Amino acid sequence: MTDPGPVRPLPAPSFRGTPPFPEAARRALADDQLRTNLRRATMTIRTKRQRAVDERADWEALRVAGAAIKDDVLARLPELLVELESNVTAAGGVVHWARDAAEANRIVADLVRAAGASEVVKVKSMVTQEIELNDALARAGIAAWETDLAELIVQLGDDLPSHILVPAIHRNRSEIRDIFRRAMGGAGRPAPAGLSDEPRALAEAARLHLREKFLRARVAISGANFAVAETGTVMVVESEGNGRMCLTLPEVLITVMGIEKVVPAWRDLEVFLQLLPRSSTAERMNPYTSMWTGVTPGDGPRAFHLVLLDNGRTDTLSDRTGRQALRCIKCSACLNVCPVYERTGGRAYGSPYPGPIGAILTPQLRGIARHPVDAQTASLPYASSLCGACFDVCPVRIDIPEVLIHLRGQVVRQHGWRARIGSDEALLMAGLGATFRSPRRLAAAERGAGLAGRLIARGGRIGRWPAPGMLGRWLRFRDLRAPARRSFRAWWRSTGSGEGQGQ
Amino acid sequence: MTNSPATEHDPAREAILDAIRRAFPDPGPVEIPREYEPAGASVRSLAEIVDRFAERVAEYRATVLRTTHDGLSRTIAARLAERGLRRLVVPAGLPLEWLTDAAVERVRDEPTLSHADLDATDAVITGCAIAIAETGTIILDAGPDQGRRALSLLPDDHLCVVRADQVVDGVPDALARIDPRRPLTWISGPSATSDIELDRVEGVHGPRNLTVLIVGG
């Protein structure tokens, strides 16, 4: 084993400072390479997922059960968390509670220090990205090494993740080779000389680079896919074996999990172990799943710490419509089918949770139910065409379009139209409101629309027309059917039916 | 590791539990419809189940070898020779007759091998707790013929012996038969990644070569 020398934490970029979605999206759309990489990757995984899902005749029943189990969890969260705590403790683990990111980061940093370590190896975990743990550890002088291949690519590239399952989906093979050549040496074992851009060679380079880190690490940090209340069992699914390395070799294991990840019973895993791999990597089963209950003498870590994190989850829970977002099992199927995500990529969402699920989860975790949010967060519920493909593929039946519309309502109530959307939509909505409130104004508007339609429409349609503001922008890409010459209300009055029984 | 009794008075714990109760004050009971195929629903014969298992494991690009109780030792020896494997990690409770014909150095985990020692071996041979046909999965539970988890992780070749009577048809069948309190590793093919352009590559950190030896069936 070579002496690692002094360990220096790598920089940990943050999503803070991402502009509101429309602006971030415009920048992403200008990047042809990004769009090519994304189109190819999402098309591949979409086709594979469909095949994997079609194999199960009972897929719909599994989805219904998965959604119901998660709803049951949300309804019984206090008792389930206490049960989980007591079973983990009985099996030799230690449970910690963290109200927010700062508290969780402090707990983890203290545990790493108490173990006398200045570095940790990490299993890919969404929740530790959410709390920006790597940055907090770096500030405490602790180097956190990401060990998932895609996370490694992101970390060495001083980059931000753009997909839940494949955080480096925005990078193609030659970009990855360049990052490895440039940055591996600064973090440990350098890339082999003459490294090619063959995926196999790149995977081999990652294996060699990380193996020495696995063998010397004394502390590992993971997230959790599920934790079973009735047994205290915690579970991580993965593909590469980096998870097994982290969960098995170090002396101390620290797992950070959102409080919504608990499931009531061991048996419930029969649902999620069928839903998750097929939705996520589009496989019958992912290569490796590890499950552990506390500590086992002579096998694996000698100390196990479980950090239960709130960080906005109870705020999310307080919203009757929005709370279904907490069912999410982080499979990323909704990203892969989303026409918006496919074109903008994940970083435009300004959060480790991109795509449709990010558009409903991020604003809620940031407290939209309780207080006005910043402009970037407020723009997220609008990052969707509401096509509904996300709901169709969601393994736990989260009605993402429903929550998007609900959150748009919250944004409007909190910020007013003017602040949110810009003056022309605000003006339009105010005008529509005034018109619909008065039968007289509505009748006048209908007459006006009929007349305007006759003047502008060609062949019954209004096409590209240089109208001012939003209407003109809208018509650049869409045709509008010409308004009827006579409105329904005018016709109804002319029949004289308006005065009778209406039969 | 002992837990501090102070947990009960942890202000963060109380605050979170309180916040949950305030957020969702009067949840009604939730009914869970389980209309999916349950454990024990399979109508396949054991022979069909084992065939299905063999087929699905092979689809992950693992090597599947079928043999009999009497032929196992020779099959293992041939596979080790074919792969050129010399230093073989042997869990403490592995049936010795499995290795009668193997001409390799046996590395036992008694006294406990260091991680560096394990990393310097070529291969490991284990049994398993149970296997799932539908998903081509083997489940290790650190039983005597498998040893602690690190044994089947660091060597680059993993040979896993599966008896026909250990194979169940579906995921629910397997969960009903394993003990959650043991450390469990579910293995479906060799380690793999799709992180580069979603192109599947077998072999990253875990054993890059998985050989599943099915006995009987």
Image: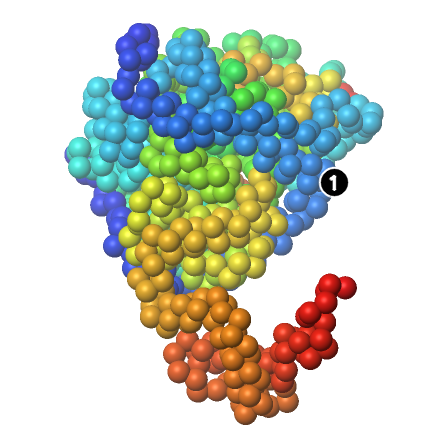
Give the quadrant of residue B141. top right
Residue at 28 percent of width and 10 percent of height: B6
> Is residue A152 among the parts visible in the rendering?
no
x, y percentage for residue A71? 54, 32
x, y percentage for residue A287? 55, 35
Asked which colour scheme the image uses, the reply is: rainbow
x, y percentage for residue A444? 52, 80
Residue at 63 percent of width and 27 percent of height: B31
Q: Give amino acid for label 1.
A: Ala
x, y percentage for residue A65? 64, 33
- Give the residue number, with chain letter if any, for mark 1: A57
SS for tag 1? loop
In the image, residue B27 above or below residue A388: above
Q: Quadrant of the C terminus of chain A?
A: bottom right
Give the quadrant of residue B10. top left
> Is residue A417 among the parts visible in the rendering?
yes
* Category of crowding for the residue at label 1, using alpha-carbon neighbours closer than 10 angstroms: few (below 14), some (14–19), many (at least 20): few
